[in-house]
Image (cartoon, rainbow, N blue to C red):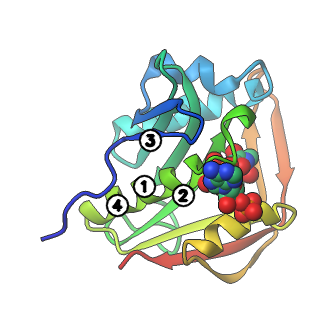
Amino acid sequence: MRKTEFPPAYTLPDGRRVTIRTLTEEDLPALEWEGEYRHFRRLYQQHYTNCQHGNNVCWVACDADDRAIGQVFILLNARDVNVADGQHRAYLFSFRIRPEWRNQGLGNYIMSFVEEQLLLRGFLWLRLNVAKDNPAARRLYERRGYVVVGAEPGIWRYQDDAGEWQTVEEPAWKMIKALR
Ligand SMILES: CC(C)(COP(=O)(O)OP(=O)(O)OC[C@H]1O[C@@H](n2cnc3c(N)ncnc32)[C@H](O)[C@@H]1OP(=O)(O)O)[C@@H](O)C(=O)NCCC(=O)NCCS
């Protein structure tokens, strides 16, 4: 019988405490930071709705005032079963921590938490894409046992907060980890 090794709370080396909980609708404005991520407003709302339908699970890391300072979203069910099949394979995306909370082990802790939660739900594989121009994030994943299994052009479209379609081109490495 597995035991849960990662309670949803982490104390940074500087003493600040962070709790991890599921995303609520009230958190959505905080995910836009100071407007830097306003263009993803509709996308975040959609991800939140997908959580309500059970296709996604979204977690936020919160400061002592319960304000979201980090986020990680997991796709459980995708159209492409190679990405997420709702049973054994899940896909991590939109993993982001506010700069003043980085480089203190929180990212690694959130990954541990996510992997444990997915294992408890019966998932065996976690997939993610990391931008080719983000070697620091790739390093974090490799330290945790993720391996590159291919490359993707990383072209996708979304409707911004004004309803305009935007195209993103972010060449990425496909990575995967066997969770046990
Ligand atoms: C990627 C991201 C989520 C990682 O979060 P983080 O909290 O900084 O991650 P960690 O602190 O666990 O690890 C980052 C580094 O800090 C180091 N670190 C961990 N604890 C530390 C501590 N107590 N003191 C100093 N450094 C520490 C780690 O060794 C790691 O070093 P490295 O860069 O040499 O590999 C964060 O950098 C981020 O939001 N980046 C922008 C968005 C992004 O790139 N997301 C990933 C998309 S795939």
Mark 3 or mark 4: whose residue is earlier in sequence: 3
Residue identifier under label 4: 116
Left or right of 49 on screen, residue 124: left
Residue identifier under label 3: 10
Mark 1 or mark 2: whose residue is earlier in sequence: 2
Q: Which mark is residue 67?
A: none
- What amino acid is at disc 2? Leu
Outermost residue toward the front in this view: 14
Depicted 143 relative to depicted 66: above or below: below
* Pointer 1 with pointer 4, Cβ within 8 A: yes
Quarter of the rendering containing residue 32: top right
Residue found 87% across the figure and 63% down from its top: 133
Dot 2 falls on a residue whose secondary structure is strand
- What amino acid is at disc 4? Glu
Which one is in front in this view, the residue at disc 3 or the one at disc 4? 3
Dot 3 falls on a residue whose secondary structure is strand
Mark 2 or mark 4: whose residue is earlier in sequence: 2
Which one is in front in this view, the residue at disc 3 or the one at disc 1? 3
Residue identifier under label 2: 92
Q: Quarter of the image containing the C terminus? A: bottom left
